[in-house]
Amino acid sequence: MPDTGPKPTSDPMPTDPSSKGAMRAGPVPGRSAPAYLRIAADLRERIMAGDLPPGGKLPTEAELRRRYAVSSTVAKWAVSLLKSEGLVEGRRGSGVYVRVVRRITRHAAVRSARGGSGSASPFARDATRAGHSGSCEHESAREAADTRVAVRLAIEPGEPVMRTAYRFLADGEPVQLSTSWEPVALTGGTPVEWPEGGPAVGVVPRMDLIGVRVDEFVERVTARPASPRECQALVLPQRGAHVLLIERTYLAAGRPVETADIVFPGDRYDLVYRLPVD
Amino acid sequence: MPDTGPKPTSDPMPTDPSSKGAMRAGPVPGRSAPAYLRIAADLRERIMAGDLPPGGKLPTEAELRRRYAVSSTVAKWAVSLLKSEGLVEGRRGSGVYVRVVRRITRHAAVRSARGGSGSASPFARDATRAGHSGSCEHESAREAADTRVAVRLAIEPGEPVMRTAYRFLADGEPVQLSTSWEPVALTGGTPVEWPEGGPAVGVVPRMDLIGVRVDEFVERVTARPASPRECQALVLPQRGAHVLLIERTYLAAGRPVETADIVFPGDRYDLVYRLPVD
DNA sequence: TCGAATTTGTGCGTATGTATC
DNA sequence: GGATACATACGCACAAATTCG
């Protein structure tokens, strides 16, 4: 193995001449923070301030090296940090760009309305309101409940359930995944056994048709990093993407009749809840 | 500068011998994905499977280099990816460890109860239920409403508001930040003008005392990367931390009487909403 | 108590593949 | 095709914190 010999690496010149006892010049990474953090903070600030607008191009790595007098490593780590925050995305051969995010607002209260505006799905309504054109792919199958689903439906593990997987698209881009489970014991043999293609759409109207009066639902909201599978399905960047996960359960007289996992790109959705006091 | 001469970098040996036409051997980064992604996926899987339990130590960088036959750069990027996902955290001089996260469940419905269990704050109740001991720091001041707050309170920008900043601690660790605004026009001169230290705690009981009957509230939930300031205040890792943000507004007969920004570490909180249908 | 070994964090330079312009 | 630019990858050096004999 060829020995390169000792290299004159970092000379003892202070990395940050601007920090001189002033406790916190920048917002937080003040004193003499690592170079890549200071550069990332600088770029982040320019993005937030609207300089470097959405869709705009960041300085290239070579420019960053020159402007901040740092090595490629530092420039890479600074940009990588912004990627992991979901602020920017790299396009190989082209540059690094500020991500554009149009927020879709999901109104939980409106979703629950019984017999409201007709045949439109709640998702399509939210998407249209945000100026998107919505569509949907779905696929249903009977299977046995696993432990998690069984607990949420208050049935025994192994009991048959109807499982339906959805993928919702807005302007052709996937923006929502969801999987729902219903006990076959409840819907089996009825006209609404299959959630899609039947005489009604949506859990509440369908259950109405078989005399099951859904009167409340519970949603558990969590945020977590997107799994690789979700990154693929939602066309998210591998790095730093987060999702909002809703575990929703519809109840009729306290008895669960449907439960679903709903996954959103965390940076594209607002969830709105309107609740009564008392 | 000493020239190192041409280095024998990547030899033409295929990086991934396990992928042979089989489209997707592993879960997603299948074909012949970059080495750092495959290593990260491998470690992620071992973490999820419970091998490498919470609090457990990952292989050191040296071990990763040996085991996967890669350079330090690749090992660093793989670990860095897991850090940005919030799965692990590094301790300099010691190692990289699987993060332990105890979730706190916040029940929005319970929070809204009027005159319920007495003097305990909703936060303290949630924390106690999760086995934490809760406490709180706060600070109030009058100031002029900025545009954002004015819109949310349906008042004019510049009108006086009472601003209160909270920091909630569970077991001594900060787990929730919140800032609330109330129009001074509503509470000024009354016994409940100052949210803390008055004859009642909580928006609903306090408003009751001055004859304002709060009857509903709206919460807007979003997820986004934590700002450096929030990382500091909540003691989160700089890298990859996300927060849940709730914009909550209390209403009395349709009129906003209080609005607040509430920030949680995204990986430590579940938000639960229970809503009626119709 | 102290020092040596270990380990992460930060940083330098370079090389190659590949996509875009 | 050529220039540009990102993505991936190799190797090394030093600082800072921890661990352990």
Image (cartoon, coloured by chain):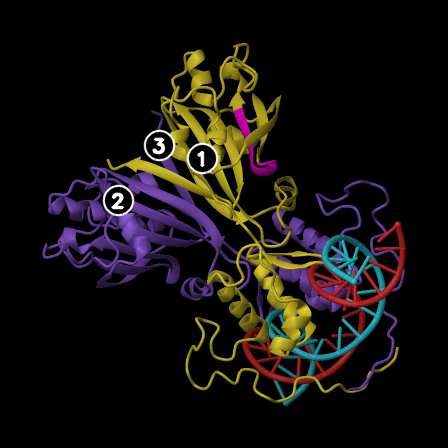
Chain colours: A purple, B yellow, C red, D cyan
Q: What residue is rendered at 48% in x and 72% in y?
A: B29
| Label 1 sits on residue | B129
Q: Amino acid at mark 1?
A: Arg
How many residues crowd around disc 3 within 10 Å: few (fewer than 14), some, or many (20 or more)? many
| Label 3 sits on residue | A275
Indicate which label's residue lies in the foreground, 1 or 2: 1
Q: Which mark is residue A84?
A: none
| Label 2 sits on residue | A250
Left or right of A272? Residue A147 is left
Element on which disc 1 rests: helix
- Using the image, name the chain to which the residue with label 2 belongs: A
Q: Position of residue B251 (x, y in %)?
A: 40, 25
Q: CA distance from mark 1 to mark 2?
A: 24 Å
Q: Position of residue A269 (x, y in %)?
A: 43, 49
Q: What residue is rendered at 35% in x and 43% in y?
A: A219
Up/down of A66 relative to A243, above or below: below
Quadrant occupied by the N terminus of chain A? bottom right
Q: What residue is rendered at 47% in x and 38% in y?
A: B130
Residue sitting nearer the eye, A80 or A210: A210
Is the same chain shared between marks 2 and 3? yes
Element on which disc 2 rests: strand
Is the same chain shared between marks 1 and 2? no
Task: Magenta stretch: give its range.
Answer: B171-181
Q: Is residue B173 magenta?
A: yes
